[in-house]
Amino acid sequence: MVRIKSLQEKVKFIIQQLKRLYREPTTPLFHRNIYELFVATILSAQMRDDRLNLYLPEFFKHYPSIEKLARADIHNVEKLLKSVNLYKTKSRNIVKAAKIILEEYGGKIPDDIESLTKLPGIGRKTANVIMSEGFKRPKGIVVDTHVARLSSRLGLTNQRDPRKIEKDLIEVVPKKYWRVFPLLLIYHGRNVCTARKPNCKQCPLKKVCPFYKNQVRDTKLKLISAEKD
């Protein structure tokens, strides 16, 4: 029997259970250094990581550094990224961002949220990924579609706006877990708690999950209704 008295206790239970499944997960985006992570996170918007990973190694062969990318012909970049969602916009963004980094930051990726979010193609989520995975200094919690969905289902937030969800999570997730917590939810969201057909019966979190309890309740109500008919 699991007795949870607070959201903080629930979060600890979630982390404990998911770490048994996924150990110490890292971002699934292909990258070997901070530059490659920077580019990959911009390109990953509205696209599955595993699909994007098919094109990243070849792209980095042509543009292995900020300097090379900053001086790239935009048409050549677009050709390499033509299979990537929104490739024209993303191509412009990564080239513009590379130029700014080369001119204003001496070719080094800035290591603070404020500077990162001023660059083309970088939003709060992307900046959080770079800070957490690239610099190992999380300044917030990454909120993507999986994190938003699972946080809601688990009763950790009732917000829909990513910034408000992040704010709620920051209040209940210990800072030492800010990097790993969203990764655990992301992996679990892909493997078990999927959007359309969550595998609740096999989920180790069902004992503390309001979504699961509601599913059970609705199933019982349907059975009762069917018996009356």
Image: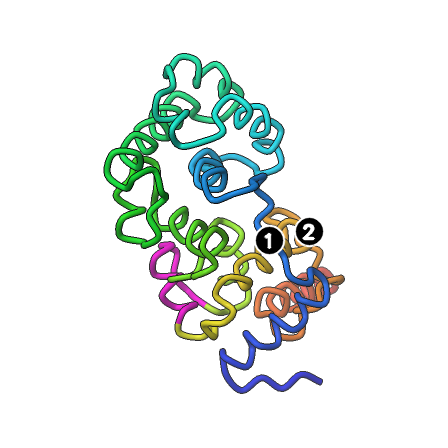
State the extent of the magenta-drawn residues as a range: 157-170
What residue lies at 30% left-to-right and 35% top-to-bottom?
Answer: 120
User: Which quarter shows the N terminus?
Assistant: bottom right
Coordinates of residue 183 in the picture (x, y in percent): 56, 57
Q: Is residue 87 above or below residue 208?
A: above
User: Would residue 129 be seen by someone viewing this image from the given angle?
Assistant: yes
- Classify mark 2: residues with Cα within 10 Å, few (<14), some (14-19) or many (20+): few
Looking at numbered disc 1 in the image, what kind of residue is underneath it?
Thr
Q: Earlier in the sequence, mark 2 or mark 1?
A: 1
Looking at numbered disc 2 in the image, what kind of residue is underneath it?
Asn
Q: Nearer the viewer, residue 229 or 13?
A: 13
> In the rendered view, does 127 fall on the left or right side of 201?
left
What residue lies at 59% left-to-right and 48% top-to-bottom?
Answer: 195
> Magenta span: helix, strand or loop, mainly?
helix
| Mark 1 secondary-structure assignment | loop
User: Would residue 229 be seen by someone viewing this image from the given angle?
Assistant: no
Toward which corner of the image does residue 172 lie, by quadrant?
bottom left
Q: Is residue 220 above or below residue 29?
A: below
Coordinates of residue 52 in the picture (x, y in percent): 56, 32
> In the rendered view, does 210 fall on the left or right side of 141?
right
| Mark 2 secondary-structure assignment | helix
Q: Nearer the viewer, residue 14 or 196?
A: 14
Labelled disc at residue 26: 1
Coordinates of residue 9 in the picture (x, y in percent): 55, 81
- Classify mark 1: residues with Cα within 10 Å, few (<14), some (14-19) or many (20+): few
Labelled disc at residue 191: 2
Between the residue at mark 2 and the residue at mark 1, the CA separation in whole angstroms equals 15 Å
